[in-house]
Amino acid sequence: MNRNLFRRTGVTFCVMAALAGTGSAAGEGVPYRQVADMLYTVMSADREVYTHMVVQRLVEDQQVIAASEHFEDDAALPLPAQMFRFGAERVEEQTEDFSYALLSLWPINKQNGPATGLEREGLERVAENPEENFYGEEELAGQRYFAAVYPDIAVAEACASCHNNHKDSPRTDIEVGDVLGGVVIRIPMP
């Protein structure tokens, strides 16, 4: 079996097994924090691979094609943030076991700003301390959630240049390695 396929399948199986246990009390299944951390590991890897292997390589390095927020009209690549949102939307269609979003204190698209106190607190915390993830609980519409916020880092020059040159960007001083925002993962609690 292809080694990469085996790794992907193994990660998928581990995440699915972990999610199966999250409906239990903390001591009976995989802890919410561990589940969120595993989900983030997969999301972060996919986001970074798309950014480096597709956008940075084809747009910045080889200048073969553009990336655009209007990718369908422009016959261009979707931006990494758009690919991330498409994945989040697909997950939302398929399961209620967890949800995720890419949010920022400096969103280019205003709908991607924090909507809850926990989101704001988490985004502020990871912006100040990108080496520390933020974890908490909150209630939304009568449902209790475990929530985790992870830093979203500008991993390539394509990230920095896109954010710095976008007409709606509230920041124009982003460098590779800077925190752009955060990935918010929510898991419903009983």
Image: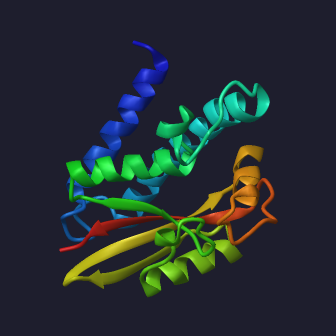
The single residue placed furthest to the top in the displayed view is 1
Q: Position of residue 163 (x, y in %)?
A: 70, 58
Q: State the residue at coordinates (22%, 64%).
A: 28
Front residue of this view, candidates 162 and 91: 162
Query: Quarter of the image holding residue 124?
Result: bottom right
Q: State the residue at coordinates (75%, 28%).
A: 63
Q: How many marks?
A: 0
| 147 relative position to 173: left or right | left
Q: State the residue at coordinates (26%, 68%).
A: 27
Quadrant in which the N terminus appears: top left
Image colouring: rainbow
| 145 relative position to 71: left or right | left
Q: State the residue at coordinates (55%, 37%).
A: 74
Quadrant in which the C terminus appears: bottom left
Q: Is residue 102 above or below residue 110?
A: above
Front residue of this view, candidates 89 and 186: 89
Q: Position of residue 157 (x, y in %)?
A: 77, 46
Q: Position of residue 54 (x, y in %)?
A: 62, 31
The single residue placed furthest to the front in the displayed view is 73
Q: Position of residue 152 (x, y in %)?
A: 61, 59
